[in-house]
Image (cartoon, helix red, strand yellow):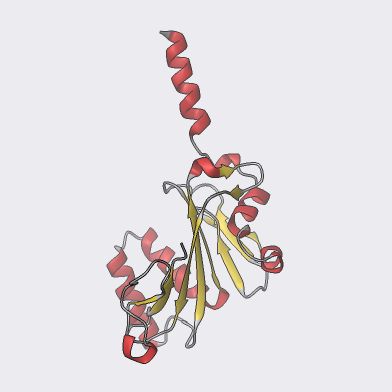
Amino acid sequence: MKNIILGISFLLVSTGFSQEALSNEAKINLATHFLPEKDKNEAKVIGYADGVEMTVLRDSKSYLTCVADDPNKDGIQIVCYYTELEDFFQRGRVLKSEGKSPIEVREIRKVEIDSGELDFPKGQSMMYVFSGKEENLDVKTGVLEEGKLRYVIYIPYATQESTGLPLSPSAPGMPWIMDPGTHRAHIMVMPN
């Protein structure tokens, strides 16, 4: 019986994922590994220092900022975005930490953008989201195999009529517009 319990404990520990197992270098590699080589080496990277507080893992003046995986969520998800979106995303992180719901965060940021209190790019801007399973992560290198990449292209206040994009994809991998007519209007692209 003792051997069975030890075996189960080993299995749980060996298949579980711990952010503490990742060095800062591995966190940076994980946050940037799907980017082209130049961007991979130059992007600013922020992450979770103690599992809760955000910290700069690598500072940079790059046009891209990447956020390492949140250790408090299941699975792996990395986000990289146009650096001029940082105020928008940072404000969302602060509001979320204050216990605001996703709808409240959206409404507060909308009011702040419309009043000019919160900076948001006027033109197009890009965000990449790469996600996958914890068991596909090499904790030594920070490489995530078999992940899925989706693209989000912000086009503030654009509509279906102003872009010709559908409101939902009618074929696999087809782009569509989400949140049309709002500050959050964006083209969603999810390749097969």
Q: In the visual, does 30 lie left or right of 13? A: right
Nearer to me, 102 or 30: 30
Q: Is residue 160 above or below residue 74?
A: below
Residue furthest toward the top? 1
Q: In the visual, does 106 lie left or right of 56? A: left
> Percent x, y for residue 158?
37, 87
Nearer to me, 13 or 104: 13
> Percent x, y for residue 8?
44, 21
Nearer to me, 61 or 5: 5
Q: Residue 112 occupies which quadrant of the picture?
A: bottom left
Residue furthest toward the front? 171
The residue depicted at 50 percent of the width and 33 percent of the height is 15
Q: In the visual, does 164 lie left or right of 88? A: left
Q: Residue 2 occupies which quadrant of the picture?
A: top left
Point out the image quarter for the N terminus: top left
> Percent x, y for residue 86?
52, 72
